[in-house]
Amino acid sequence: MSSSRLGLRLAVCLLNISEARRKYIVENVAKAALLKKNGQKHPEVSVLNVFSDQGYNRSVITIAASVAELDLAENLVQRVPGCSVFLFGEADLPEKRTLVQRRKQLGWFTRRDFSALKPDLGVAPARRCGLTACFRAL
């Protein structure tokens, strides 16, 4: 995604997926992030990286988009069943919590029952599978 406009504000999204062994699933999620609600490609959305760890069966997809395209999170929730979205940084209004603050607030690393979490968009994450997205405006 390149732009000649000065001052273009970007948002980054880290999609954490409990899947790495079935490449087609990871690719389908990455492709879904690039599409608008009408099925056409977002002109200002790019997949920057896809990292899959087959040993842990986890993948992370890094996406960059114009802040104007923050409906990307809503599109993911509609296109990917079971998607959970947690906002942080500039995308987390009005609190603007950092990722560390957000994870502490959620008890992300100490929690055993993820079904009680209240994501900003989507459904509560499943204990062992699913897709969780963190959005941050840069």
Image (cartoon, rainbow, N blue to C red):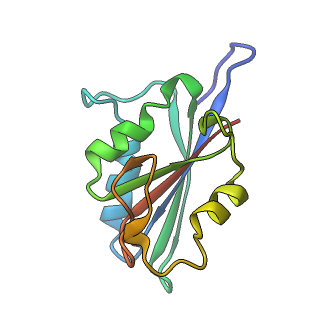
x and y, in percent, of residue 19 in the image = 39, 72
Which residue is located at x 40 percent, y 43 percent? 33
Which residue is located at x 63 percent, y 33 percent? 94
Assign the N terminus to one quadrant of the image: top right
Residue farthest bottom in this picture: 55
Which residue is located at x 40 percent, y 55 percent? 84
State left or right for residue 108 relative to residue 73: right
Vertical relation: 119 (above or below) 74: below
- Residue 69 visible to the viewer: yes
x and y, in percent, of residue 51 in the image = 55, 65
Q: In which quarter of the image is residue 103?
A: bottom right
State left or right for residue 3 relative to residue 44: right
- Residue 34 visible to the viewer: no
x and y, in percent, of residue 69 in the image = 49, 27
Vertical relation: 132 (above or below) 36: below
Which residue is located at x 48 percent, y 74 percent? 58
